[in-house]
Amino acid sequence: MGYFIDVILAIPVERMFTYSITQAESEFLQVGMRVSVPFGKSKIHTGLVGAIHTNAPQIYEAKEIHQILDETPIVTQKQLEFWQWIAKYYMCTVGEVMRAALPNAFILESETLISRNLKKEIKDTDLKDDEFLVFEALHHQSTLKIQEVSSILDKKNVLPVIKRLIDKEVILLQEEIYDKYKPKYVRYVKLQAQYTSEIGLHQLLQDLSRAEKQRQVVMTLFSISAKTKKPIKVKDLIEESGASAAIVKALIDKEILEEYHIQTDRVQYEGEDNEATKALNQYQTEALKQIKNKFETQNVIVLHGITSSGKTEVYVKLIEDVLLKGKQVLYLLPEIALTTQLVTRLQNYFGEQVAVFHSKYSAHERVEVYNNVLENTNTAKIILGARSSIFLPFHDLGLIIVDEEHEQSFKQFNPAPRYHARDAAVVLAHLHKAKTLLGSATPSLESYKNAIDNKYGLVEINRRYNNVQLPDTELVDIADKYKRKLMKGHFSDRMIEEITEALEEGYQVILFQNRRGYSPIVECNTCGHSPQCPNCDVSLTYHQYRKQLRCHYCGHNSAMLQKCMACGTSNLDTKGFGTEQIETEAKSLFPKAKVARMDLDTTRGKHGYEKIITALEQQEIDILVGTQMLTKGLDFRNVKLVGIMNADNMLNFPDFRAHERSFQLMLQVSGRAGRTDKRGKVLIQTYNPYHKILQQVSTNNYLDMFKEQLQERRDFKYPPFFRLIKITLKHRDYNKVETASDWFAKSLRQVFKTNILGPEFPPVSRVRNQYLKNILIKIPQQQSLAKTKEAINKINSSFEAVGPFKGVRVIINVDNY
């Protein structure tokens, strides 16, 4: 009887592959362990054991595994169930979920290594010049990688040379797996045992009487160890004694000091003892009581608390309760920028129990957090993270908090799995029998409707913390201001007046413009030509700080033009404006103020967000210009004025959620103003001050917006009344995409008859030289979602079998909004 395992590979294939193992391996292996396995002709992949059994595969001969990589499972049974749900619901493969779920360092890749064949005698004369160079290099180095051979021979294609060397039996090829994660070790020192007694130490100091610096190091070591019981780092000893690393090394060589290494986490909490959490006011206390009561009967609750109502403190009290029961908490945030402020707040309360997990962390740091959650250590009781943290290996999850649950950043668009972290979190909590709290000042229509329909519980806080007043919102009609010549650049006279007043009173100002760069369009005034991206159907954005034109879709860039490429005149002008232009104008209008900018360009580094947020908190910045990063739950005490530079480009966006999104964005950014006793002010510049959404923002009327948008969604068959699945077809050949999308849409119409929209080109119809065409499927509530997906999968399988459509990529995006 043979023993076999089914292995999940981190590649988009539908089924698991079966490999053969020995009886001893079958007794040792467990589901959730990693193994390296041969796949394809000569590649080695990391796979995850999905099942252990004795059934040989019918269609192919099972290969043997290469090696076992773990001693214990690194993926839990609940995680695997969760992966299966994501793959099924979001119509992707479990391998794609595995690729997203595991830190990169866990998914090892193979690299081809070349070594010398020591069993065969080789004469130099038998080899050509390029072959001899490789042969010679292998005398100095036991193995070479393909790219190293490439640099030795100084040519890209070295495979013919390698093939000739294999034929002549000069070299051997081997595939080797590299473990990408390396633990971090810190160097410590202590006195050798014979010198720890008083007599031994006295004798040592006498012996070192002529080596003053070495004596000084020993004395420092002795005084540090008298003060602290902790092990002493080499780095600290060098700093304290003022000696060099060479002197410490000399003492180690003389065997006076003994060095040793301790493995340590890369991310550590270095703080004082924990603070007590804040006392809640009557509205927060009432909300907390309601949440606890509703959790008795309902698993998901929507907390609708206006901006600055103190939702975070309510979360903190709930976290305290869950920790007392010994369970873990997942705190999901939409944006990495938010974690910087929250980490500090939560660490003040919970100390080292807080772990942070997001994409700005290095591979090694993420592996450490993953391992800490897997081992359920005390340093990973509260996980604070962006959307990918739902994939961590939780043991005993008690509560998931989704903060700013309305945010679009919770949806993953590329690559697969195209999941929505908020919806997936509800399923994850259900698997762990945990509770979910969705918090927002402007809940998404879907969540609020679920709450009104009693699917979810609803708790509201309608007062700001300390009874601070909501900001006073004023709409500025810039069409009228332009007519009366009261605009300076993009600033109206009212905006300049209010900014001047706020700065004079010592307050800070936030200016919001949801577009980065200096100007989205550069246009020739003579012939009207505008530079376009060669790879995408979109105009290039001008970035002044680098004097270049950039494409925000594919990253293509070129130097700013001095002359028009079409007619050769130098009469070039910029149209529209982004954060850079506002920053430049603000500097010239308010020369004494310190102006800074917060967008994707200024926050690229790991600590990019932190620097800007800290500078604003320390009041080193007077005016901060930024994109939507600014809108999300950040707490700035000294901001009195928020200016929205142009509300119209959000409202006129071609998307069924444009109005809802604009309302959320403007209300959130308004919420940054006046968070202390002085009432804040919000100025919204617009060409259309009578627009319903702008009126609703100015009166903070969420319910009106909700009812109106819900009615529109019902009329036009959009969520939450209809489910959406978007299918995108992609290829370099325009005609291929045309015919393929027509075929796909016709096949869908044969099955579903109605509610199929498209195929249609999106607003930007070519990205990275690939043409795109979209088909939208609307699924009414009475139609089975599972059967709909089954039908789509069948059509997709037939599509892949059609010869002329080979190479056309089909992307299926469930709940694409």
Image (tube, rainbow, N blue to C red):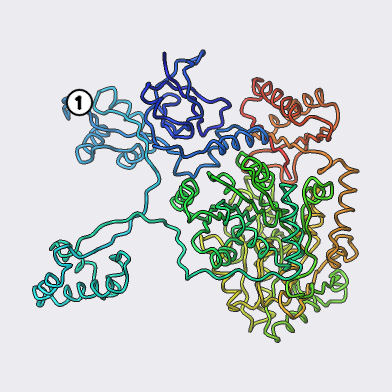
Q: Residue furthest bottom?
A: 504
Can you say which quadrant of the picture contains the C terminus?
A: top right
**Residue 603 shown left or right of residue 678 in the figure:** left
Locate residue 36 relative to residue 288 in the image: left or right: left
Under mark 1, the amino acid is Asp
Q: Residues within 10 Å of mark 1 (few under 14, many from 20)?
A: few
Query: Residue 588's image quarter?
Result: bottom right
> x%, y% of residue 34?
44, 34
Q: Nearer the viewer, residue 125 or 739?
A: 739
Nearer to us in this view, 186 or 178: 186
Residue 590 falls in image quadrant:
bottom right
Residue 222 picture location, percent across and down: 23, 73
Residue at x 69% of width, y 56% of height: 567
* Quadrant housing residue 414: top right
Which quadrant, please, contains the N terminus? top left
Point out residue 668 in the picture as x, y percentages from the top left corner: 74, 63
Residue named by callout 1: 126
Q: Is residue 170 left or right of residue 39?
A: left
Above or below, 433 against 695 in this view is above
Q: Is residue 321 depicted above or below 418 in this figure? A: below
Q: Judge whether residue 546 can be spotted in this image.
A: no
Q: Secondary structure at mark 1?
A: helix
